[in-house]
Image (cartoon, rainbow, N blue to C red):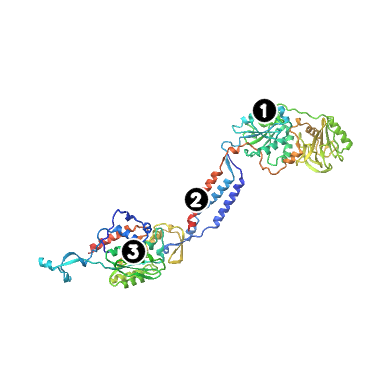
Amino acid sequence: MISVLFPGFLLAGAGLAGVVGALHLLARRPPAREALPTARFLKEDARTLLRLQSRPTDLLLLMLRMGLVLCLATAFAGMVWTPGRRGEGHVILLNAGAGSGLGWDSAISLVGAATAGANGAESVVVAYGLGGGARVVDIASLGSLERGTEAATAEDGLRALREVVLADTRFSIVRAEWVLVPTWSSWNDGVGLMRPAIWPGRLPIHAVPSARAGGSAPSAGSDPTRGRRASVVGLAADNLELALGALGVPVGPVREAPPRPGDWVFGDGISSTELGALVERARSGEIVVISGRLPEGAAGVPWVGDATPKSRRQGLVVPGEPRFASGVESFGGTPAEGAAVVAVFADATPAAASVPTGAGCVVYLSVSVADGALHGSSNYPELLRRLTGGCSVGDVPDAPLGRGAIASLQRDDLPDVVDVAGLAADQGVPLSKWWVALALVLLGGELAMTRPRRMS
Amino acid sequence: MRGAARPTTGEASDLLPPEVLERLGSLDLVAKTIVRGFISGAHRSPYLGSGEDFSRHRAYQQGDDVRRLDWRLFARTDRLYVRLFQEDSNLQGFFVIDASESMGFVGDGAVSKLRYSQFVAAALAHVMLRAGDAPGLASFGAGTAFHLPPRNRPGHLHDLLVGLERIEARGAGAPSQALDEVGDALRRRGRVVLISDCLFADDGEEFLAAVARLRARGDEVIVIRVASRLELGEVEGHAARYFDPEVPDRVVDAVPGKDPGFRGRVAEYYDRLQRGLEEQGAEYLPLTTDMPLVTALGGWLMARARREARAS
């Protein structure tokens, strides 16, 4: 496979070659004036002279010069030929955080299955959620890998992709895919909406059937969205179902812990007294969901700033539902320090945040509610049920996104096309020197052809 | 050139191309190198006359000089014989070199037409002097120039070669005036050797008239035409704006290689000139600047010697 490290040089070279061609045509030499004592016997033939004047040596010279420019541009573009590795490698993102304990052994097995199924191409495992951050790990030593002490999130996986895989010059990142299962369609949607904040580049999302989604799991070779294509597959032990679905492996039932009735309290506005009581309930082990305008100097809630109605926003997105409202009135403010974002608006602005409080948890939803129903949604109870998932990391499809992490990920210096397959560029053959050699040959030809003109 | 000139055969000097001769440097060395190629043995005039060396007897004929009667032989045989002697060749001649601008043309050859002409003149002067003739040197270009009168004395060859070296291609002179002046300079019948590219402005009409006048005087006229194959159309020329060096203002946009009639038109011109010269009884020798001089001149001299021997 041929890959180009700096394609801009190719464009620049093509432009320069065009300029050379234009100059060549503009600077056409006038016919040479030569002495010939028998000139009087010649027949005037200006047309043939004009026709022959620009033929064929001049055309050859033009081609030589344009070829020379293109060769140099191609040499600078850093062309690399990777024999026999055409997009068959995988970069496997492996969640090695504390929450991966449940399915760790299965995950290692899946990694083995994925690498064995890569048709001999090299696969790389990037483990994230480790104590020291994400890094490329040896597949053979996965069994003895010391996992992190804190739960890792999807955000960590994406960050690993960006900061480890992209920073590693061995990988040529050409494409990324994030594979999700359809039973979590709302979460899929959520990821899709939040994704621009997490990953500014292109990130197609594919729903992959799994056993839990109904029906048998597809085989590794039948799913066009995965397998041999050059792609990054998110493999998270926390989200075992997701990982298995990505790899086409049947999975068993996933544990869920639906919120208990009465675990939440909400209202359009709340007083300081009410707020204190609710926080106290949270400390005693309840999950408390608060919505509406907060009192001045509110403490114990995962939200700070001006919580007065600000503007209407599009698409409140929470794990568990596709979209709760097409348009909602939002309050201002931002998630507090240490709080986890558990819902966002369509523009990736945080909409809800949670913070552990004592044995329980407090969730704040920055959306105006009235009469026990979210405006524009008939499924407000379900919204609340999903919001409570933000307090129970082990039971949600993925861990909530930290506000700080979102900020750190909101960068625009990433390539437009981002996710990928593991292609070891350092094992490819650099072609630059050959292009330089060809350019030298062309230069020699050009000098040889123009020598008579220079001499004259 | 009344010598018994014979080209040697199979010698390396036969193959010396003009560019090699050019590297030899001085015309003296060039002339000797060429002449060595086609002269061998004694060089003696085939003409019998009033020289010192006895040749043979011949029966007396009316009109013979009685002073040449061999009275001793008459006493022995009672018949009248005259004694014949090897004639002392003292023919006066002129090399007339075309030094017009066009003679500086090099073309596809290694040397210019003028340089080639200098080689030819040097070699023939060598031969003439060895034969006892007295060659002189004149040229025409920017005007007619007399460089040396016809002489045959030690050192004359050197002077003649120096004179040849000094000739430069300039101007666009007419040969007729030069030939007339040369004819006037010859005190008695002589030989005029014109070396030129024969590209004359009036298609050679005045030139032929001048040759006719020389022939009417009884002078021998030899015209050696020197040309490059490029200007003869025998080598394909490329596309260019061509001009005659002697008429630089007249430019012809042409492609000689794509002009099939070019070669024919040049050949027709020279054929017409040759016919005109032959009608006048002049000798015409066409040469091209890529021809080895030994071969070109040697063959011509040998054929000429045979012709003269038959005539005598």
Which label lies toward us, 2 or 1?
1
| Labelled disc at residue B121 | 3
The residue that label 2 is drawn on is A445
Task: Identify residue type, mark 3.
Answer: Ala
Could one spot residue B156 in this view of the protein? yes
| Horizontal relation, residue B110 to residue A189: left or right | left
Q: Quick one: label 2, few (<14), some, or many (20+) residues within 10 Å?
A: some
Q: Quick one: label 1, few (<14), some, or many (20+) residues within 10 Å?
A: few
Task: Identify residue type, mark 2.
Answer: Gly
Element at label 2: helix
For the N terminus of chain B, which image quadrant? bottom left
Q: Quick one: label 3, few (<14), some, or many (20+) residues within 10 Å?
A: many
Which label lies toward us, 2 or 3?
3
The residue that label 1 is drawn on is A144
Q: Nearer the viewer, residue A9 or B258?
A: A9
Could one spot residue A113 in this view of the protein? no
Check the image and report above or below for A309 versus B3.
above
| Horizontal relation, residue A257 to residue B180: left or right | right
Circles 2 and 3 on the same subunit: no
Q: Residue furthest front?
A: B154
Q: Nearer the viewer, residue A93 or A395?
A: A93
